[in-house]
């Protein structure tokens, strides 16, 4: 049975398994996006630090994390990122549950907007984010590029 969303879970997190989940969920991006995802250079220890330094939202099944999202407050929005759903669990509404939990958490912190970035090339993600209530608001260009590399999406709370 898939659990409710845990926000900053106090229990043990299997970091190698979480690192593997992130890599499996992001694998379809390899060779499609330029520059490559920052995940390609993240070690398991980097992921462990991220779970401590940012808000961490997780959904488990039988104790194993099957979906997650990281978030943190910024000046004008609550930024979400590294949204990952294990391939076997995609299309079952877990991303929506994570985004809704992040939205509720952001509201408790006084934020009125969620923000996320999606690579320009990943148009299927743009469609998913649209169904989750996000709209494109601007473009972002990674350092060293002369073209936009990501779309900034925002969702009012």
Image (cartoon, rainbow, N blue to C red):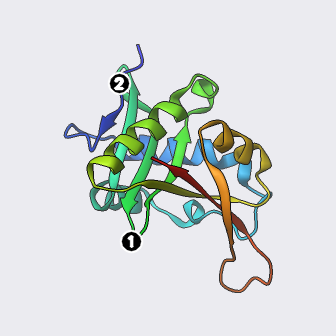
Q: Earlier in the sequence, mark 1 or mark 2?
A: 2
Q: Position of residue 156 (x, y in %)?
A: 50, 50
**Residue farthest toward the top in the current orientation of the protein:** 1
The one nearer the camera, 133 or 146, is 133
* Residue 86, placed above or below residue 77: above
- Residue 59's x, y, as percent? 40, 31
Q: Residue at x 79, y 49 (%)?
A: 123
Q: Quadrant of residue 17?
A: top left
Q: Which mark is residue 75?
A: 1
Residue 128 in sight: yes
Quarter-of-image position of residue 11: top left
**Which tag is nearer the camera, tag 1 or tag 2?**
1
Q: Secondary structure at mark 1?
A: loop
Please provide percent x and percent y for residue 71: 40, 54
Residue 47 pos. (x, y %): 40, 56
Direction from residue 36 to residue 31 in the image, left or right: right
- Residue 4 is labelled as 2
Q: What's the CA distance linking mark 1 and mark 2?
A: 29 Å
| Front position in the image: 127 or 70 | 127
Return the mark for residue 1: none
Q: Secondary structure at mark 2?
A: loop
Mark 2 burial class by Cα count in 10 Å: few <14, some 14-19, many 20+:
some
Relative to 26, is 7 above or below?
Answer: above
- Asked if the residue under mark 2 is in contact with the one under mark 1, i.e. CB atoms within 8 Å, the reply is no
Task: Confirm whether residue 45 shows in the render.
Answer: no
10 Å neighbourhood of mark 1: few (<14), some, or many (≥20)? few
Q: Is residue 59 above or below residue 47?
A: above
């Amino acid at each position: 049975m898939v659990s409710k969303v845990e926000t900053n879970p106090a229990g043990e997190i299997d970091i190698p398994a979480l690192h593997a989940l992130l890599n499996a969920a992001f694998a379809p991006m390899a060779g499609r996006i330029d520059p490559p995802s920052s995940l390609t250079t993240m070690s398991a220890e980097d992921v462990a630090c991220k779970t401590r330094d940012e808000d961490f939202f997780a959904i488990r099944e039988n104790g194993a994390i099957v979906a997650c999202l990281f978030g943190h407050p910024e000046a004008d929005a609550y930024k979400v990122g590294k949204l990952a759903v294990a391939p076997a669990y995609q299309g079952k509404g877990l991303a929506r549950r994570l985004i809704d939990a992040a939205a509720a958490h952001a509201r408790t912190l006084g934020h009125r907007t969620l923000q996320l970035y999606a690579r320009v090339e990943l148009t299927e993600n743009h469609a998913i984010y649209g169904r989750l209530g996000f709209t494109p608001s601007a473009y972002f260009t990674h350092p060293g590029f002369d073209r936009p590399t990501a779309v900034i999406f925002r969702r009012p709370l």
